[in-house]
Image (cartoon, rainbow, N blue to C red):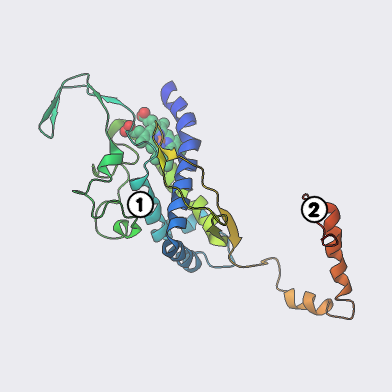
Amino acid sequence: MNEYKQQNIVVAGPDTISITIEWVMTEIMKHPNIMKEVHKELEKVVGRNTQVEEYHTPKLHYLNAVVKETLRLHPVGPILIPHRSSESCIVGGYTIPKDTNVHVNVWAIQRDPEIWENPLEFKPERFLSGTGKSDCSGNDFTYMPFGSGRRVCAGISLVERMLPHVLASMLHLFEWRLPEGTDLDLTEKFGIVMKKATPLIAIPVPRWIADSRDQYTKERLDAINNEFKLYRFHTKLNCAYACPKGLSTEKR
Ligand code: HEM
């Protein structure tokens, strides 16, 4: 691996993954029915009493389709990295002379209505069956979020493992909501990498309370169920000393 590729790994790695996670979460929050489907799949594949492990992620077909659909509408590298033709060639009837700088607008290709049905609709199902558009490795020229050819993204296999794992872990235990009174903003900020124009602010809400450490909840509740049980409530006043916002139940 040459020095430039090593530098690219440092530059391309962290930003691209976090930007894509932000886009996936934005699309999922915009479509509550899709969040519900993802949760349903997680309950089936992972279950409630286990945490997400790497071996679960290839079985999360719907979540993987959500990631692919996000990369279709929001490719991190919208115009790829500039390429230069090593030979003269003809592409689509156009002659490209040797040594021409070529910019491939993947963003536009992946929204082309001649290729994609209702291209602006976020529809993970298009990657679930038989369309043939699920190959991320650059062999399908209608879908190239990682580029194509010799300079295709070197991080594909890492991304394919990491993205669904991180997302599944975030979505398995939590439902994600917007702060009250705010709207989702899907405006893009074009650049070498395509970010959201405004950062996503999302609040995690636990989906269920699960204490996997033991099965003695009932015994614990029985143990404190006596004439002092209300008195025990006084401990909440202790919170007033520790509360970082200085809130106290004694003050009005
Ligand atoms: C969602 C995440 C990512 C996306 C969408 C993405 C996309 C891309 C794209 C479009 C290119 C240009 C390919 C071309 O011009 O044909 C590229 C190049 C590259 N990517 Fe990624 N990338 C991601 C994550 C990563 C990660 C995590 C790493 C490394 C750990 C990485 C390493 C590289 C390298 C080294 C290149 C340059 C390859 C070369 O010039 O030969 N990428 N990536």
251 to 185, vertically: above or below: below
Callout 1 touching callout 2 (CB < 8 Å): no
Q: Residues within 10 Å of mark 1 (few under 14, many from 20)?
A: many
Number of residues whose C-alpha sits closer than 10 Å to that of mark 2, classed few (under 14), some (14–19) or many (20 or more): few
Q: Which mark is residue 230?
A: none
Residue 16, relative to residue 208: is it above or below? Answer: above
For this view, does 96 lie left or right of residue 101? left
Give the image location of residue 252, x and y in percent. 81, 61
Circle number at residue 69: 1
Q: Is residue 29 left or right of residue 142?
A: right
Furthest residue toward top: 99
Image position of 161 (left or right of 148): right
Which quadrant would the N terminus be assigned to in this image?
top left
Compared to residue 4, the image places residue 145 above or below, namely below
> Can residue 70 be seen at all in this image of the molecule?
yes
| Residue type beneath disc 2 | Cys
- Name the residue located 49 percent from the left edge and 42 percent from the top edge: 198
Q: Secondary structure at mark 2?
A: loop
Which of the marked residues, 1 or 2, is nearer the chain's N terminus?
1
Residue 98 spot, x, y in % from top left: 18, 19
Residue 38 placement (x, y as % from top left): 45, 62
Find the residue positioned furthest to the front.
Answer: 252
* Numbered label tally: 2
Q: Under 8 Å from ligand 1: the CB of mark 1?
A: no
Observer able to see residue 2: no
Q: Residue at x 25, y 42 (%)?
A: 109
Q: Nearer the viewer, residue 72 or 52?
A: 72
Q: Which residue is mark 2?
A: 243
Q: Quadrant of ligand 1?
A: top left
Q: Is residue 206 above or below residue 138?
A: below
**Local SS, label 1:** helix
Name the residue rendered at 58%, 64% in the picture. Answer: 50
